[in-house]
Structures are given as C-alpha cells and as structure tokens.
Amino acid sequence: MSLSRTTVAAVAVAVLGSVFWQVPAVAAPPAAVNAPQDLWTIPTAPAESATLIVAYSFGNRIPAGVDPATTIGEPGPVNADLAATVMAARGDRNTPVYAQTEIAEVLKSRYGLTDVIVIDPERQPDGTLVYLSTDGVAAKVAELRGAAVSTDAVAVVAFRDHLWRATATTAKHGFNAFAPQGLPMPDTYDPLSGQAWTTSPFLYLPTDFAGRLALLK
C-alpha cells in the first residue's frame, strides 16, 4: 500500500510525540540565527538577496561492484534535480555556490559551473569515507566563510522533506539562512538510492523529525 507524505508525516509525529512533549520550553535564539521555532515553518527570502547558495545532497547511486565504504556515490536523479534547483536560484547572477559532492558534480558536468565550492566528505587513513551530516556540511561552509558568516545571507537548496532541517542547521552556524522564495524543491524519492533512509518518506521522515526536535532544544 502506498502512503502519502502527509500520512507518513503524521505517523512520524505520532511516533515521536512522547519525545516532543518532553522537550522543555526554550528561549528565543539570537536574532542573527534565523531558525524557525516550530517543526514546519521555513524562512523564505528572494533568491537575489542571497550572498551565497548552499546545496545539500540527498541520497546517491552506488555503481555495481564498488565498495560503498570507500566510494562516493554517483549523483542519481535527486541530486541532479537539486543541481537544477541551484541553477534556478542562481539565475544569471554570480552568487557563490557551496555544494556537496554529488550536486557539485552535476553543476560542473551538466551546467559548466566551474567555480562551485565542493563540500567533500573526509576520509579515514584507510580510505574509508566519513559520513558527512547536514551539520557537518554547514560547519564546513561556516569555516570557509570565516568572518563573513555574520553578514552572509544564505539561500538553502535541499530536498523538500530535508529543507526545514537544512535551513535551521545552516542558521545554527550563524548564517541568516532561508529557502529561495517561490522556488519549489525536489520532492520525489529515489527507491534505488544507495542511502537506504533516503529511498522513501516512510524511512526518512522519522529520522528527519528527530533531527528537527534536536534543533529546538
């Protein structure tokens, strides 16, 4: 039986409900941290007001016969759609783009975007990839921007069900972060993704809502 995203979201909230109601009241964050204060609302602003774009990948495709522990997956259809969304947000402006590897690959090969700043995962000494979380991406971008963080306006591009958390996490690192106003985000899951939790809303949303709750603490 196929479940709608709304149904799955309701199930996720129900499963996490007991945790949610135990979260203590929190003080409002500093004004510079433009984080939403519920689990749904995402700040928006015109794309042309951004000083940079940060693009978060979602899933990948693992080629046959390779070791997924040491091989960065191919972009797959979702990250290709995210790359197209980056280009729509950028328009004909020279806004700097910081993108995870899977999106950056498409931006370079399909759109000829040679100046994209690639956010790659780290590797262990034995070559094993270290999973790069949403928080890890935002931290790397903040490190690269340095003192500019306090004045940066970041247009966040992410899969639709990931967008709240990607925007809030970016804001947590000191950025004024928002979704590009009026620009729809990719929302079709890839059942062949190499990351199992990104293959369906049923698998993804409970984890995402748990991450959202953590950001409200």
Image (spheres, rainbow, N blue to C red):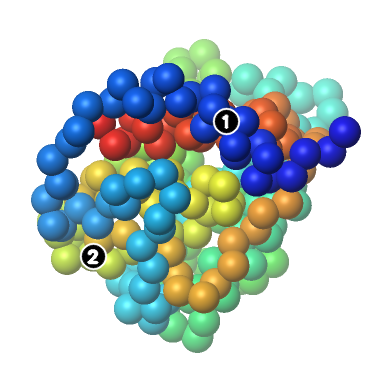
Residue annotated with mark 1: 12
Residue drawn at 52 percent across, 46 percent down:
162
Which quadrant is home to the C terminus?
top left
First in sequence: mark 2 or mark 1? 1
Q: Is residue 61 left or right of residue 12?
A: right
Secondary structure beneath dot 2 equals loop
Label 2, residues with CA under 10 Å away: few <14, some 14-19, many ≥20: some
Mark 2 is on which residue type? Asp
Which residue is painted at 52% across and 32% down in the image? 13
Q: Residue type at mark 1?
A: Ala
Q: Is residue 180 above or below residue 119?
A: below
- Reading the image, the residue beneath label 2 is 152
Residue 72 visible: no
Residue 158: x and y in percent read 53, 53
> Residue 139 placed where, x, y %?
30, 41
Quarter of the image where the N terminus is located? top right
